[in-house]
Amino acid sequence: MESLDISQFFSHFAALFGSLTYCLIITCNMTVLLTIALDRQLHKPMYLLLINLPINDMIGATALFPHLIHSIVSQSTTISNLACYLQALLVHLYCGGSLIILTVMAFDRYLAICRPLRYHTLMTASNLRWIIAGMWLTDVALIGSLFLMLTRFRLCSWRLADLYCNNPSLVKLACENTTANNVYGLLITVLMQGTSMLTVLFTYGHILLTCILNRQADARSKALRTCGTHLVVFVVFELTTLFSVLSHRLSVSPFLRRSVGVSILVFPPILNPLIYGINTKEIRSKVVKAFSRKTKKFKNKTCA
């Protein structure tokens, strides 16, 4: 793997910063996850779909941070074959999962706002279970098949171009012809990105039109606020993905490529729970209420 270029003097500070960042990601995402899971009032299609996002974000963060922190502390840039393939698999499952989850959430908002009379008929508990299972199975099938194709190659080198293992870096190390892998990887990227972009454009075009035609100011404001939160999360992920892909395709400095590559595993997992926690009134009120209750109990115990 690429050298971290961190002096031994600063390595402890870097490891501490990485550990705090990882803890922040886990804490924020677990807060959103547990808030939805433990409150039956939030067991609605929108939130039960949303609960998959913090799970996916924690997968992405866990794929990066534990090994990165270990590498900083030990000043080692080596990784075993199995660990490298596992890390790459988790990274791509996270990226594919983010696209699929955000796409399904966009379509859910389209049904809720543009087809309200059919929404509860379509988004039943049974259908919702199938949708959630379908999201994860699609992600595992597409990404899993990509890595099954990758494992058949013999690698001529183990010097990766990035700070973490991923499919493009591993394919570059293969001794044999990788045309089939490159074509399949491109097809998956086009399929997932194209489907996601077209779905979001279609759904938000209709949502915007519905909101414009809706004469009820409260309903219009709530719809725009809910969809605006989702759109911000989608744009953040797409921008970090775009920068990461372009850094592999264009001639950029190694430092910039590594920084941009890491950003996709850092910024969305941090920002997603903060954006949803702050902008979604139902989640924000539940978190504040729970925090206030815990603080009150702590004060009572201290006084006693």
Image (tube, grey):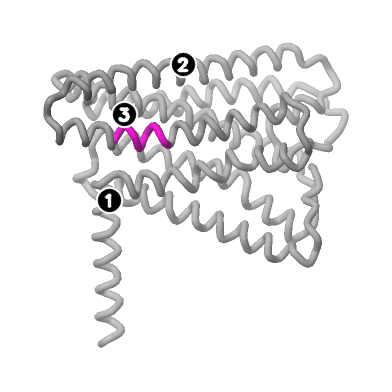
Which residue is found at the position 39% from the left and 45% from the top? 275
Which residue is found at the position 29% from the left and 56% from the top? 287
Q: Is residue 91 above or below residue 269?
A: above
Q: In the figure, is residue 199 to the left or right of 287?
A: right
> Could you say which is closer to the camera, residue 105 or residue 179?
105
Residue type indicated by callout 3: Arg
Q: Which of disc 3 and disc 2 is earlier in sequence?
A: 3
Q: In the figure, is residue 116 to the left or right of 287?
A: left
Q: Which of disc 1 and disc 2 is earlier in sequence?
A: 1
Q: Is residue 82 visible?
A: no
Residue type indicated by callout 1: Leu
Which residue is disc 1 drawn over? 38
Q: Residue 195 carries which label?
A: 2
Main SS category, magenta section: helix
Q: Is residue 229 visible?
A: yes
Q: Is residue 139 above or below residue 190?
A: below
Determine the CA span between mark 2 and mark 3.
Answer: 22 Å
How far from the left and from the top, in percent, is residue 60?
Answer: 55, 41
Which residue is disc 3 drawn over? 129
How far from the left and from the top, in percent, is residue 94?
Answer: 54, 35
Quadrant assignment for the C terminus? bottom left
The residue lying furthest to the bottom in this view is 304
Residue type indicated by callout 2: Thr
